[in-house]
């Protein structure tokens, strides 16, 4: 499992994208899948920096781990930001209901 730890700063997003691209290419993903994976991880890390660390005045980090096993790619993101529980804001009672009815 390859890993990367970066400071929780927007200027480190390039390192994150480079890490994801290199690992995804090594795993044999096609160029479109590599791009989509980069985009998704970039969004996750950006949201972590913007919302998870928004009110923290300390120098925290974000750790990424990349696993390629059994024809499955996994990215694990670990941070020390403020927790967010969507159940406090949204109801997930009927996920099969039309979007407008949720």
Image (spheres, rainbow, N blue to C red):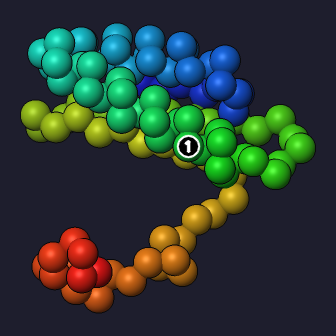
Residue 5 in the image: state x and y as whole percent: 60, 27
* Residue 93 visible at all: yes
Query: In the rendering, at what x and y percent does residue 16 appear?
Result: 50, 21
Q: Relative to the observer, which residue lies in front, 1 or 44?
A: 44
Q: Is residue 55 left or right of residue 33?
A: right
x 65%, y 25%: residue: 10
Q: Residue at x 59, y 44 (%)?
A: 48
Q: Among all residues in the image, which is located at the extreme bottom?
A: 93
Observer-nearest residue: 30 or 89?
A: 89
Residue 79 located left or right of residue 33: right
Residue 64 vs 26, above or below: the answer is below
Residue, x 24% and y 75% (percent of image)? 100
What residue is drawn where x is 69% and y is 59%?
Answer: 82
In the rendered image, residue 96, in percent from the top left (x then y), is placed at 14, 79
Question: For this rendering, which residue is in front, 80 or 12?
Answer: 12
SS class of the residue under badge 1? helix
What residue is pinned by disc 1?
Answer: 47
**Quarter of the view holding residue 92:** bottom left
Above/below status of 58 relative to 87: above
Q: Where does the C terminus fall, quadrant-wise?
A: bottom left
Q: Quadrant of residue 21?
A: top left
């Amino acid at each position: 499992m390859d890993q990367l730890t970066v400071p929780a700063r927007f200027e480190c997003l390039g390192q994150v994208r480079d890490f994801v691209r290199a690992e995804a290419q090594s795993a044999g993903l096609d160029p479109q899948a590599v791009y989509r994976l980069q985009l998704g991880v970039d969004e996750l890390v950006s949201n972590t920096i913007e919302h998870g660390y928004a009110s923290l005045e300390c120098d925290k980090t974000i750790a990424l781990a990349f696993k390629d096993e059994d024809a499955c790619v996994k990215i694990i993101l670990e941070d020390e930001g403020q927790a967010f529980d969507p159940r406090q804001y949204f109801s997930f009672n009927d996920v099969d209901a039309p979007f407008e009815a949720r």
